[in-house]
């Protein structure tokens, strides 16, 4: 049994990672700043799920607070750290760039410094499929060039990979970066498409469909992400340069309109579509090559089908919001708005 630090513990993936660590007997110290990027009540509800579990403790901390993070790592020592705290969202980075510089660059540097000073045995941190930018070769491989980010968010995540590489080189800090591919599931983020689509569809509103539906996404259910995180956490990289970057994705990209059809079936309501052009910072397609992930013991070999995952999300969404279930109509066609 060991104590694992999880930053961003009140976040979507963070909560699920904490639950999985606790379930297998690890002790977890979670930190989060509970900011208002989206409704903090959701973060507080996630945190409440964790605080009832034996072995979990929590400290409120902003990772961009350099003095605060330094003092935190002086008080605690960790053999392993899962760093998930970050400013998320591609589109938000267009309008709020400084938030990304603080959380994703200054904050990550603070965590690296804490791990260096505390001689952490393994740092696992969240990168993103967004680093692949405008790459058109599918599936995306870790060996592909990622020098053309199309959003500031993507640029900060690529910067994280470079920063981790330098700390592995200079100080021998074992670092594993995980490029997540469109994570979804219960307790998710309200800014993600599957959540906003669900809210709009239940309200009878049209949903925005960017690039006129010509989008392909590698949707990955959160439990599969967590299984990958824990498998990687348990197998730190070794050698003269102990660092690596890995894709974690379902490797089964789904056209956006097919995704909407699956969500429509899970909800039992019809969708009205508002066709729109591509948003700044978006990319038309993502797909993960998970060959390297598959070589790690305990990593998921089969991923949750999209329909199954969306049904689980919808069931949770209705319960969380106190909504009654409706009979499903899997044959209902999507309706286009005028």
Image: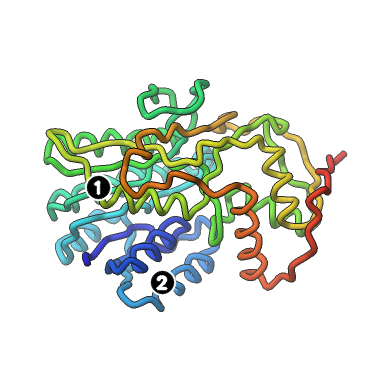
Q: Nearer the viewer, residue 98 or 31?
A: 31
Q: CA distance from mark 2 to mark 1?
A: 25 Å
- Of mark 2 and mark 1, the one earlier in the sequence is 2
Question: What kind of element bears circle 2?
Answer: helix
Q: Nearer the viewer, residue 84 or 309?
A: 309
User: Disc 2 designates what residue?
Assistant: 50
Q: Can you say whether 156 is above or below 263 in the image?
A: above
Q: Quadrant of residue 261?
A: top right
Mark drawn on residue 235: 1
Image quadrant where one finds the N terminus:
bottom left
Image quadrant where one finds the C terminus:
top right
Q: Is residue 251 left or right of residue 229?
A: right
Dot 2 crowding, Cα within 10 Å, few <14, some 14–19, many 20+: many
Q: Quadrant of residue 176?
A: top left
Q: Can you say whether 206 is above or below 316 in the image?
A: above
Front of the two marks 2 and 1 = 1
Residue 257: x and y in percent read 71, 38
Residue at 41% of width from left, 28% of height from top? 141
Q: Is residue 162 left or right of residue 196?
A: left
Residue at 39% of width from left, 75% of height from top? 51
Q: Is residue 103 visible?
A: no
Residue at 36% of width from left, 42% of height from top? 178
Residue 200: x and y in percent read 73, 54
Dot 1 crowding, Cα within 10 Å, few <14, some 14–19, many 20+: few
Q: Is residue 21 left or right of residue 283?
A: left
Q: Are marks 2 and 1 in contact (CB under 8 Å)?
A: no
Q: Can you say whether 14 is above or below 232 in the image?
A: below
Residue 301: x and y in percent read 43, 44
């Amino acid at each position: 049994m060991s104590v694992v630090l999880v930053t961003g513990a009140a976040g979507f993936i963070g909560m699920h990672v904490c639950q999985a660590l606790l379930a297998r007997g690890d002790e977890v110290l979670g930190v989060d700043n509970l900011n208002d990027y989206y409704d903090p009540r959701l973060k507080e509800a996630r945190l409440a799920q964790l605080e009832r579990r034996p072995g979990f403790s929590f400290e409120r901390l902003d990772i961009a607070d350099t003095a605060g993070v330094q003092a935190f790592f002086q008080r605690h020592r960790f053999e392993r750290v899962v760093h998930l705290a970050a400013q998320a969202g591609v589109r938000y980075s267009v309008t709020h760039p400084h938030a990304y510089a603080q959380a994703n660059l200054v904050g990550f540097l603070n965590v690296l410094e804490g791990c260096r000073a505390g001689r952490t045995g393994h740092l696992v941190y969240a990168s993103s499929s967004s680093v692949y930018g405008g790459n058109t070769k599918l599936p995306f491989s870790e060996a592909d060039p990622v020098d053309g980010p199309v959003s500031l968010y993507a640029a900060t995540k690529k910067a994280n990979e470079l920063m981790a590489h330098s700390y592995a080189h200079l100080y021998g800090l074992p670092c594993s970066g995980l490029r997540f591919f469109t994570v979804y599931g219960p307790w998710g983020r309200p800014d993600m498409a599957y959540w906003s689509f669900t809210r709009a569809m239940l309200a009878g509103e049209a949903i925005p469909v960017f690039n006129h539906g010509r989008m392909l996404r590698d949707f990955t259910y959160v439990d599969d992400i967590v299984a990958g995180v824990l498998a990687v956490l348990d197998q730190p990289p070794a050698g003269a340069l102990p660092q690596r970057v890995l894709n974690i994705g379902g490797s089964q990209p789904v056209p956006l309109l097919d995704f909407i059809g699956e969500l429509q079936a899970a909800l039992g309501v019809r969708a009205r579509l508002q066709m729109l052009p591509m948003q700044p910072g978006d990319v038309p397609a993502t797909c993960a090559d998970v060959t390297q992930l598959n070589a790690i013991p305990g990593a998921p070999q089969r991923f949750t089908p999209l329909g199954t995952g969306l049904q689980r999300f919808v069931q949770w969404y209705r319960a969380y919001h106190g909504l009654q279930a409706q009979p499903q109509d899997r044959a209902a066609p999507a309706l286009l708005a005028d």
